[in-house]
Amino acid sequence: MQTQQNKDVTTVELSRRLLEAGLRPSVQRLAVLGDLCHHYDHPTVDTIYSRLQPQMPTLSKTTVYNTLRVLCDAGLVRSLNIEYANQRFDGHLEPHDHFICTCCGRVYDLPHNRTADLPSFEDLGLQVDREEISYYGFCRECRDKQAR
Amino acid sequence: MQTQQNKDVTTVELSRRLLEAGLRPSVQRLAVLGDLCHHYDHPTVDTIYSRLQPQMPTLSKTTVYNTLRVLCDAGLVRSLNIEYANQRFDGHLEPHDHFICTCCGRVYDLPHNRTADLPSFEDLGLQVDREEISYYGFCRECRDKQAR
DNA sequence: CTCTATTTTGTAACCATTACAACTTTAAAA
DNA sequence: TTTTAAAGTTGTAATGGTTACAAAATAGAG
């Protein structure tokens, strides 16, 4: 669950997604987007950089930051807002929620816990584009560890 | 809505809450907790500091940080996790959701959009303590501004 | 092939947050 | 009271994630 992978996303598909979003499919962009589509482990910028750098020795961390911003703006990637944590990213685009262990900080995917569509707050003058549901608590590992 | 206030919370009441949480009701703690209970505007650390500093010239920003952490741990205050923003705080404790304008960054309170209690993820080994629902979009002001 | 816009890179700066040690205040005991 | 120890506050310095910026590299158009 945590280290779920999805190797099905080919470079061709990634390239198509970038082009569709009006972005040039550079090596770096393909690498960053690919990393997020192949690992659903909600990595930090640093994690992404560390995974890619060995294969791309000239890669700059600034590029990872820039690329992630571009990908987020294009909607190809989500950024998660997690208490007491660095920014984290998610290449998993189908609607789903997150569980954050307040003990170890790990992030788990959850099925989207919402029966209906996005609620409307038009009466308040608010146009809702996106919803983010996060649960906080203890994962099994941390509960077991604490029990001992 | 945005600058909603609640002057009904007296110092005596704030003091009682602190003591009940096992915290000494120091001047600084009363001030920080009071600020968050009197303004429901989801301030940043800096905003809180700026509001209190004029009346408390010796107040240190470190104290504001320390105090907020202590208050959060005690459950007297919530911290919000908002995309592309500094940490923000909320002294409004009844369950409610938030709307964040992706244009101006303002945070609006919403009624809690959840019919049932916290869902259970026991089957996944996850013990849920807390839920956070955030909506992102455009507020009326920013929509109007963009329309022009 | 040349030119120009786009993208990437590395360094330096920025700024929110935390570590730490000194100082102050408080509460309780003597 | 006075003393004493614990709790709380303060300011400075360090940390570390993120961004600004300018130079270098790259890619697509003509």
Image (cartoon, coloured by chain):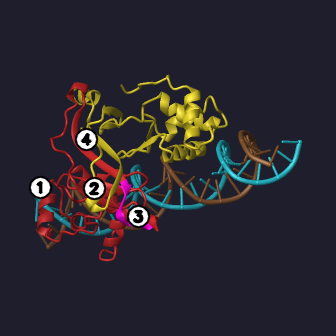
Chain colours: A yellow, B red, C cyan, D brown
Residue B101 against residue A54 in the figure, above or below: below
Q: Amino acid at mark 4?
A: Ala
Q: Does label 2 lie on the same chain as label 1?
A: no
Q: Which residue is mark 3?
A: B142
Image quarter of residue A109? top left
Q: Amino acid at mark 1?
A: Glu
Q: Are marks 2 and 3 in contact (CB under 8 Å)?
A: no
Point out the residue furthest to the top here: A8
Per the model, the C-alpha gap separating discs 3 and 1 is 42 Å
Q: Which residue is mark 1?
A: B20
Per the model, the C-alpha gap separating discs 1 and 2 is 37 Å
Q: Which residue is mark 4?
A: A116
Q: Are marks 2 and 4 in contact (CB under 8 Å)?
A: no
- Residue beneath the point at 23% across and 68% down: B4
- The magenta segment is B137-145
Question: Neighbour class for label 4 at 10 Å: few (<14), some, many (≥20)?
Answer: few
